[in-house]
Image (cartoon, rainbow, N blue to C red):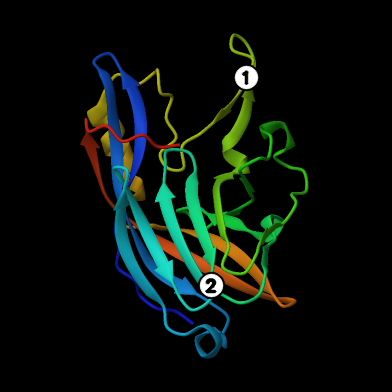
Amino acid sequence: MKKNLFAICVLSILIGCAGGFQRIAFDISLNQVERPTDAKEQYGEVNTTVTESLGKTFLVFDDKLLNVMFFFGDKSIGITLKNKSDHSLKINWDNAAWIDPFGESKRIIHTGVKFVDKNSPQASSIVVRNGVLRDSVTPSENIYYEGKPHYEWRCLSLLHHTDLFGVMSMQSELEKAQIYVGKTCGLLIPIEIEGVQNDYLFTFNIGEAFLTDRTQIGF
């Protein structure tokens, strides 16, 4: 089942430059959600809102089973998921996926998984009835190990991968970022309840790209 949703948040990409930090930001909207064909009967209509908390904008999804809040950070998507049912539910992270702006489905890892284990099996998360899960997800393909001179794990941005310290022209970067405008990205979250898996596919529209000096801490 598909339903158009309208909600807007800003996906911020921090980019270092000689004059300090500027950001290429995108207007991100939660456009539609796919659920199993019988989900409307079991879990009711879909609702969406936008909420502000601690200076951040969250996209909120709601039906009779779930309330989910999304926050788009620089490299990850924050998720606060409430189980509204009378049963425990399970999220099988190995079946979850990030769908990039070019339609490719990518494996994701969630909070607590070490970067070195990004390709290893992940334990499922259990959310008890009326319980809340606070987590974040990152495309594992964006995580890489850099050798000399840093010898450390690094992570690319969700959109518009850029060398933070090699940018000389923000206007040039903004022009490059236009390739994403008008495309969509998505997040597939498999929700298992009473032994039945319900795949929730959240699709987000990528809107206007722009430069901003406003401070917003992402992750």
Residue shown at 41% from the left, 71% from the top: 32
Residue assigned mark 1 = 152
- Residue 49: x and y in percent read 32, 66
Q: In the picture provided, is 144 more to the left or to the right than 53?
A: right
Q: Is residue 219 above or below residue 130?
A: above
- Which residue ends up furthest to the top in the rendered image? 149
Seen at 74% across and 49% down, the residue is 122
Viewer-side residue, 199 vs 167: 199
Rendered-image quadrant of the C terminus: top left
User: Residue 199: image x %, image y %?
Assistant: 60, 71
- The x, y position of residue 114, in whole percent, is 69, 34
Of the pair 179 and 21, the residue shown nearer to us: 21
| Residue at the (70%, 39%) spot, across then down | 118
Q: Earlier in the sequence, mark 2 or mark 1?
A: 2
Measured along the vertical axis of the image, is residue 86 above or below residue 74?
below
Nearest-to-viewer mark from 2 and 1:
2
> Residue farthest to the right?
121
Residue at the spot 41% in from the left edge and 50% down from the top edge: 71
Q: Amino acid at mark 2?
A: Lys
Label 2 SS:
loop
**Residue type indicated by callout 1:** Glu
Label 2 neighbour load within 10 Å: few <14, some 14-19, many 20+:
some
Mark 1 Cα within 10 Å, few/some/many (few <14, many 20+)?
A: few
Instruction: Please tell me which residue lies in front, 105 or 7.
Output: 7
Q: Position of residue 211 (x, y in %)?
A: 22, 35
Determine whether, in the image, residue 71 is placed left or right of residue 209.
right
Q: Which residue in the protein does label 2 denote?
A: 84
